Image: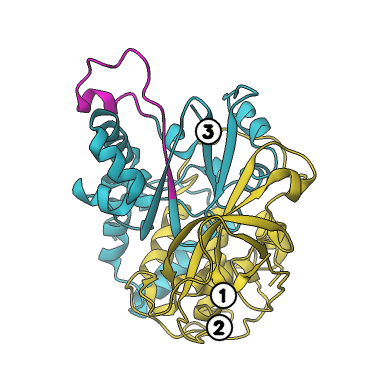
Amino acid sequence: MDGIHDIGGMDGFGRMARDESIFHAPWERTAFALASSARMVGNTDDFRHAIERLDPAFYLGADYYGRWLGALEVRLRERNLIDSDEVDRRAGSATARPHALASVGLPTASPDGGPVRTLERRPLFAVGQSVMARDLHPIGHTRLPRYVRGHRGTITRVHPAFVFPDTNAHGWGEDPQYVYAVQFAAAHLWGAGDHSVSVDLFEPYLEAA
Amino acid sequence: MTNDHDHDHDHEDDPRALRAEALEAILIERGLVDPAAIDSTLDYFENDLGPMLGAQVVAKAWADPAFKRRLLDDGLGAIAELGLGGPQVDHLVVVENTPDVHNVVVCTLCSCYPWGLLGLPPAWYKSLAYRSRVVREPRTVLAEMGCELPDDIEVRVWDSSAEVRYFVLPERPSGTDELPEDALAEHVHRDQMIGVAR
């Protein structure tokens, strides 16, 4: 989905503030620990996608662990593990109740085994090759950032194959894919800049260019 | 509950604190979270992990050229020699700063970070400003963070958009030739391993 989370290159978020806090308040520690411990509610990809599906205003207004807490509550409600107003009743109000776009598919819990997989087939692309990031707009989860779509880059590394988030987030199988470090020139992405940006892209996001 | 955060103080009128407390109670009642796991998770992330682990890797690479070659060639294999790895380090790429090249790491889509080497990230790494801007204007972002890069240095930004984690090997500071490895580790700061300091 083309969600609020995909902010690479956006303007307007202000100057860098040197906030070194790991947690700002005890509830953030609780949110982190609950989201990390309640593994039975899905998998990492579906957790990220639940954050992405949060109402955009909620996403921007919540701090990092506010999103974790919101996404956890959404996932529990979507799986009927808690009633829709259960947290409201316990917390004494519906303030800060998270809402989210429905997912196009929810996975069941998956065991923790790490995301790296071995494939029989060879990678389609090689180091040094010129590729284009496809201009895809899937309705579900994706790790293809908007700012590289339709841009040409160069493969600089061929990584192992990994579980494909675009399917795994929805319970559509692991469908492992090779991942490539693709280097883009800032001048191509932004029209200015002398740096490069390297993005890790799954094979289905790419075509030869 | 035995965890000390119950004794700490949330703002009592913060609805997020009330919701976190409510969810915690519900999950424990339903058996969806083991209370002991809450404490052990926090203890592990707050006490066992942290930038001191990454600093060990850097110090070893500075002191041992053969290890440095292995680290740049196979990050995960090399840190495993030191007994390191851990959460969010399923595959590791170490990128080397040189007099001509500066590397900096971000995750624009969420806030992926090599927990197993650096612990949990600071708030600024997860901020909307850092995530949105460092891919577009890294020199300006770094300058705002107190790191002025020379104009002639090449800047490479790494957006960790998949499960590969990136880690910056900073340059060894001058005047440290005589130092043993454990003393070298004290010269390594977290910000250098993310790439927002030289």
User: Is-magenta flag for residue B169?
Assistant: yes
Q: Quadrant of residue A36?
A: bottom left
The residues bearing labels 3 and 1 have C-alpha atoms spaced at a distance of 40 Å
Can the viewer see residue A161? Answer: yes
On the image, numbered disc 2 is attached to which residue? Answer: A78
Badge 2: residue crowd in 10 Å (few <14, some 14–19, many ≥20):
some
On the image, numbered disc 3 is attached to which residue? Answer: B102
Quadrant, the N terminus of chain B:
bottom left
* Dot 1 and dot 2 residues touching (CB under 8 Å): yes
Task: Tell me which secondary structure the magenta stretch mostly adopts.
Answer: loop
- Chain of the residue under the numbered disc 1 shown in the image: A
Select label 2 or label 3 by which is in front. 3
Mark 3 is on which residue type?
His
In percent of width and height, residue A204 lies at 59, 74
The residues bearing labels 1 and 2 have C-alpha atoms spaced at a distance of 6 Å
Question: Vertical placement of B153 versus A71: above or below?
Answer: above
In percent of width and height, residue B58 lies at 32, 35
- Number of numbered discs on residues: 3
Chain B tint in image: cyan
In percent of width and height, residue B165 lies at 43, 53
Chain A tint in image: yellow
* Dot 2 and dot 3 residues touching (CB under 8 Å): no
Is B78 displayed left or right of A131 in the figure? left
Select label 3 or label 1 by which is in front. 3
Dot 1 falls on a residue whose secondary structure is helix
Magenta stretch in the rendered image? B166-188
Question: Vertical placement of A103 versus A185: above or below?
Answer: below
Question: Vertical placement of B114 versus B176: above or below?
Answer: below
Question: What residue is shown at x 58% (from left), y 59% (from top)?
Answer: A129
On the image, numbered disc 1 is attached to which residue? Answer: A74
- Chain of the residue under the numbered disc 2 shown in the image: A
Mark 2 is on which residue type?
Glu
